[in-house]
Amino acid sequence: MRRLPPLHALQVFEVAARAGSYAQAGLELGLTHGAVSRQVAALEAWLGQRLFVRVGRRMVATPAARVFAEEVSLSFDRLTAAAEACGRPQAPRVLRVSAPATFAMRWLIPRLDDFHAARPDTEVRVTTTTTLQDALRGGFDLAVRRGPDPWPQHRAVPFLTEADTLVASPALLWNKPLATRNKPLATLRDLGGHVLLGTETRPGDWSDWLAAAGVALPGGVRRRVFDHFFVTLQAVEDGTGLGIGPFPILDRMVAANRLAVPFPEIRVERAAYFALTPFDADKSPALTAFIDWLVAEGGRPSLTIPR
């Protein structure tokens, strides 16, 4: 018989090497810091050498341990593929997806029925984060984040480009009773007569768009700032003021006449969205199919902002 290392210790070690700390590995695996430490110590005893060294307050994988972790990950991938081939093809698969809230609400979730139609045996469970750069914490099979942050412990696949432009409630633009206190918005000179709605987590939206438009607003322009973009978006939809919105994320809101785009030709290109999968993730056919689907959906042109 082959003399194999303890399987559970290998699994814990692989996550700890990718996550970069025992504490982060414990969060992902649902284990205490001590339990992670004991499993790593058991593997170190089996191998007869140290796998982690202390750097400050963290335990960091040695260069040899990082190479070993990559090999372990590849072995788990092969084992997963073999089990998938020999397993029950009708067994349901669950994909855990972490995504920013607005992206999940306005782009991903409305499209999931199309994925489910193609993969009825796969259930996609979406959890949301409140900012585009939230840390990659907790258990997930795939995370959606916007670049260009480095993700050295994850495979990153770009799938969607984004551009910002001015958005408003159709009722506000048409000067219905909702917006009688506002001026029309026929030209860029009319911007000063409206409330500009911003978001703390997107501090550069207005300045970047105004620079692209070549507009310098006079002093005294009314502004309101909210903590998260989905709150700002609701305020825009309610006719409270003007906002800056991402496309094609908001395409469906424009198609449903819930938002209008007064100056679609004035746009600010933003960083792409990436599908991130941990190197130690279960590379199942369901996960691969979901990534391929994201790339295909993301390749469709925006219906709102011209290229």
Image: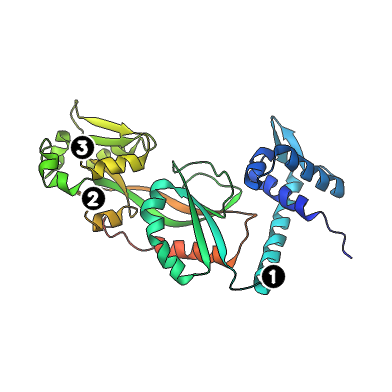
Residue 96 located left or right of residue 100: right
The quarter holding residue 26 reads top right
Q: Which residue position holds label 2?
A: 259
The numbered disc on residue 215 is: 3
Residue 266 visible in the shown view: yes
Circle 3: is it few (<14), some (14-19), or many (20+) Cα within 10 Å? few
Q: CA distance from mark 3 to mark 2?
A: 22 Å
Q: Which residue position holds label 1?
A: 82
Residue 144 visible in the shown view: no
Residue 289 located left or right of residue 219: right
The disc, 3 or 2, on the residue closer to the chain's N-terminal end is 3
256 lies above or below 233 = below
Residue at point 86% right, 49% down?
Answer: 46
Percent x, y of residue 205 = 32, 39
Q: Quadrant location of the N terminus?
A: bottom right
The disc, 3 or 1, on the residue closer to the chain's N-terminal end is 1
288 lies above or below 210 = below
Circle 1: is it few (<14), some (14-19), or many (20+) Cα within 10 Å? few
Can you tell which of label 3 and label 2 is closer to the viewer?
A: 2
Callouts 3 and 1 close, C-beta under 8 Å: no
Q: Amino acid at mark 2?
A: Leu
Q: Amino acid at mark 1?
A: Ala
Residue at point 58% right, 73% down?
Answer: 90
Label 1 sits on a secondary structure element that is: helix
Q: Amino acid at mark 3?
A: Val
Q: Nearer the viewer, residue 68 or 83?
A: 83
Residue at point 20% right, 29% down?
Answer: 221
The quarter holding residue 216 reads top left
Q: Nearer the viewer, residue 283 or 240?
A: 240
